[in-house]
Amino acid sequence: MNYKKYRKMYHPVPLENREWPDKEITHAPVWCSVDLRDGNQALYSPMTIDEKIEFFTFLVKLGFKEIEVGFPAASNTEFDFVRRLIDENLIPDDVTIQVLTQAREHIIAKTIEALKGAKNAIVHLYNSTSTLQRRVVFHKNKEEIKQLAVDGAKLVTSLVEGQLEGNIRYEYSPESFTCTEPEYAVEITNAVLDVFKPTPDRKVIINLPSTIEVATANVYADQIEYMCKHLNDRENLVISVHAHNDRGTGVASSELALLAGADRIEGTLFGNGERTGNTDIITVALNMFCQGIDPKLNIEHIDEIIEVFEKYNKLPINPRHPYAGEMAYVAFSGSHQDAIKKSMDEYEHDESHMWANPYLTIDPTDIGRKYEPILINSQSGKGGVSYILEKKYGYVLPKKMLIEFSALINDMSDEKQTVLTNHEIHQAFKDTYVNVGKPIKTRFYRSSESEDASTILTATLEYNGKVSSIEGIGNGPLDALCNGLRRFLNLDFEISDYTEHALARSSDSKAATYIGIKEHGGKRIYWGAGVDHNINTASIYALISAVNRMLSR
Ligand code: KIV
Ligand code: ZN
């Protein structure tokens, strides 16, 4: 790997007294979706016009007020799509469509033609300005490239003023801005602004694209702050950023750019776009959301957004996507599961209702998700197992029993070499502890009170296939059964733990009882559980289960 053939592609930014590191994001930017342009152009099979219309309608539903709908001069599909949006009145009055055009005469003319009849539109003019593009692609010097931009801007304004009647705004992008000398980026943009003539009522959008990411996000922030401080008429400009993701930092670049003064973000829903993609708007928006800032997008039904995105783009969402991934709210590690469960319990009972969770930045229910299923593998601990048993099936195990069962689950997962489903965990719990009927099975029992107020219990049991009757006397049915069993089995044991509760999840109100028994003088606890409509029967079953586990040790 010959790293020596690479060098920095960006120019030093002569920024003094940089301010952005001390700033914070306080409000949502203007969002502009470029899914139908940057996103669509990066698809193996681009959308048909009907699909584009459906996707456009969906973007409107998500709350986008500015949507780049294409490059009308690039193909008939793009042109016809814009025409259908306008002719069929598909653009709500509060939504502005944006069209892209290079600073070339015939392309500009076709673009303006596509916009006839539009109520609100942005004409987005761009030309490439970087050192490398000027030298290798355009063979033009700085002056010539500037002239190209100015000529393009002049043609745009004259055609817009002459042919269009709606509310038409201008946007200019010095494409490949991140590799352009900052002083030159200011010079060329100011020259375009002299043509566009921004006013308070008709601000001009200056879009500073990270066409290719070539530096850490702080360098981009420096470039943006430098532009904000040196462009003419800053108060009549909307500074926009359009960050690609070549270094995997498109989101960070856009966020730091907001600190540096940007007002607007261009991006795509899940970061789809040329090469490694564009800024992922869902992530930026939810990053704001979890800092207590209204993202001003309707993204509370994330699964619907994924479904629509995948249908039209035919691209899958990464399972580890920060918020939307199917694994985003799944914790494998036992200590994580434990901490999440404790924090969720606290959140449920906390009157202030402020979210604070050590491993989940947002409450998944805010975007229509749940913290489940927790996938249990051999790394998981009792927190996850207890969460599943309690939240899914209603069992609240005593702590010591939970420790024993979690170890069993870890072994199961280790052996299976994969995660266990909720169903497998529930089944393992039932098979191991609940109403265990081997080697002893309870066929029938009856208890009655004697004259001295003690309880007499008689039971018909099947022990290793043989039916026997036993009788015991004690302080209540359970004590009486213990006494009867001790004699019948010649086994000296005692009850060390007893817990019971109603099975909240059960539709037909059953009781669950957990019993731990120890051999006289022994340390090991043998656990059993009983579930029945009758609380006494549940405890009889729990005791028999525990005794069965002791007998099968
Ligand atoms: O990435 C880019 O620079 C662009 C421009 C056309 C804005 O898409
Ligand atoms: Zn782009």
Image: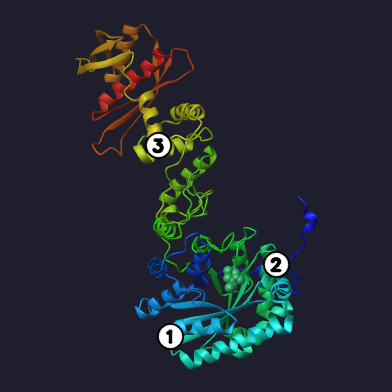
Task: Give, as a three-letter code, the residue at label 1.
Answer: Lys
Neighbourhood count class around disc 3 (C-alpha, 10 Å): few under 14, some 14–19, many 20 upward: some
- Do the numbered discs 3 and 1 sit on residues whose CB atoms are within 8 Å? no
Residue under label 3: 422
Residue under label 2: 219
Q: Nearer the viewer, residue 544 or 517?
A: 544
Q: Position of residue 433 (x, y in %)?
A: 37, 24
- Which disc, if any, is residue 116? 1
Inspect this view and state whether residue 214 appears: yes
- Do the numbered discs 1 and 2 sit on residues whose CB atoms are within 8 Å? no
- Which disc, if any, is residue 283? none
Q: Nearer the viewer, residue 146 or 79?
A: 79
Q: Is residue 55 left or right of residue 435?
A: right
Task: Give, as a three-letter code, the residue at label 2.
Answer: Val
Q: Position of residue 544 (x, y in %)?
A: 32, 18
Q: Residue at x 65, y 66 (%)?
A: 212
Q: Secondary structure at mark 2?
A: helix
Task: Give, as a three-letter code, the residue at label 3.
Answer: Asn
Q: Residue at x 70, y 70 (%)?
A: 179
Cα distance in 3D space between marks 2 and 3: 47 Å
Q: Secondary structure at mark 3?
A: helix
Q: Is residue 324 left or right of residue 24?
A: left
Cα distance in 3D space between marks 1 and 2: 40 Å
Cα distance in 3D space between marks 3 and 1: 58 Å
Q: Earlier in the sequence, mark 2 or mark 3?
A: 2
